[in-house]
Image: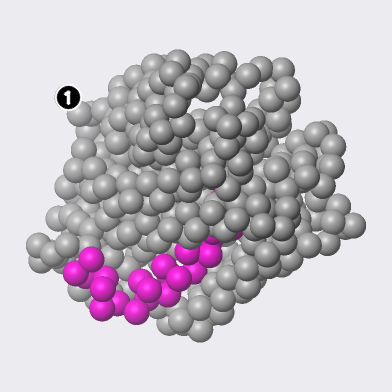
Amino acid sequence: MDGHKSSRTIISLLIAIGFAVMFASTAIKGIYQVYFVQLAEHYGRGRAQFAWSGGLFMLATGFMSPLVGALSDRVGPLRTSAIGAFGAGAALLSVAVWHQSIVFFSLAFGVVGAFGLAAMTFVPMGILVDRLFEEKKKGLAYAVVTNGTAIGFIVLSPMWIWLQPQASWITVFAAVGVVLALPIAITLWLASRWEPSSAAAVSAEVPTKHASAWSVVRHDAVFYVLAAGFFGCGATMAFIDVHLLPHWQDQGVPRFEMAFAMSALGVLELLSGIASGMLAMRFNKHRLLALFYAMRSLAMLLLLAPWLGIVPFAILFGASYLGTVVLTSMFCFERYGSQIKGKVFGLLFLVHQLGAFLTVQLGAWSFESNRSYLHAIMALTLLTLISATCSWFGLRGSDRFPRSSDRPIRQARPNLDVKG
């Protein structure tokens, strides 16, 4: 009995740590988002020219995702996150100390910082949850962990907006860098002693031949449908991360309203993450995923109706924010064997970030050519509508029948022995 209680305590602790990691990771993109215009001015660039640093960050995050998935499978998700936190912290601190070169900024933030974000977010946390819970509970547990990003929106985004006129970007980048590189990285490395091993899960499944993730998914139509939808997810998230606040600033939206809208987005993100995990236990996941993408499309359309205010957009976009990520991860982790599921999820996030990269540039080009984000918003509205259509028609039946070659014979209990 005491051992069972101890295991439950460790699992709860690991979920809380995963939540905290996701919360802290929002600072990496949040400070870039709020200081985007000032950064461009500091380096003497227009928005389209400086947006390449954000585009590189998005693209590098995508390319780092399969690497992070493989690293998580090998050394464990929390140690991977510890390495990522140290890398991101070092990158932010270094650009604050040496801030004369835009090339150095782009490489440090856009590459090293991108690795840090990838290592602290959806892929490693998905693998952590996958090792801790049985199939029926994974969706809800993953929603709880990823809601750390929602709390980041609720708490941190208004704080960055408030700090922006009070403190320079150099000061904020340096402070966040120190916190990530030291206390957070050290805590994660120590906590990794309690994370479960993948050995039990691997032994419980039909052995997978030694094949790369790509060789398994390249002939799987479901992977391409998931990737097509996730491309739209990444594209819209990138618009929020880079161009949303400048878009509102250009429209003259008061700072208080922007902070309130970002908090509202975070609250709805929190609720949508939990709701998607619970609904996936009762309804067809492909229909839920299509619904979330349709909501995302309508939210983008609301940006073209400024007379309605910014809160309706924040509510609808926030309600769709985590649902797409949670449900896509559930499709992935249920469909592919434990030896490659981290790598497959990493491939999906590579496609996700390709969409993000293109949106960063599309938004910048749209503004530079028309002094407006109108064309970018219209394109994203159409893209997420396509994502909804792909999910509705392309994933029918796949949420009930995982790949037989990778279907578990039995569900193994996680090994929670403390690592030496």
Residue 164: % across, % down = 69, 25
Q: Is residue 126 above or below residue 23?
A: below
Tag 1 residue:
420
Q: Is residue 44 visible?
A: yes
Residue 13: % across, % down = 42, 31
Q: Is residue 50 above or below residue 278?
A: above
Quarter the C terminus occupies:
top left
Q: Quadrant of residue 124?
A: top left
Instruction: Say whether residue 5 is magenta.
Output: no
Residue 323: % across, % down = 56, 59
Q: Is residue 259 above or below residue 132?
A: above
Query: Residue at horizontal 71%, vertical 58%?
Result: 370
Mark 1 element type = loop
Query: Residue at horizontal 46%, vertical 31%?
Result: 102
Q: Is residue 165 left or right of residue 95?
A: right
Prevalent SS, magenta region: helix
Q: Quick one: 43 or 291, which is closer to the camera?
A: 43
Query: Residue at horizontal 27%, vertical 43%?
Result: 72
Bounds of the magenta segment: 214-239
* Colouring used for the render: one colour
Q: Residue furthest right?
A: 307
- Residue type highlighted by circle 1: Gly
Instruction: Say whether residue 237 is magenta.
Output: yes
Q: Quadrant of residue 350?
A: bottom left
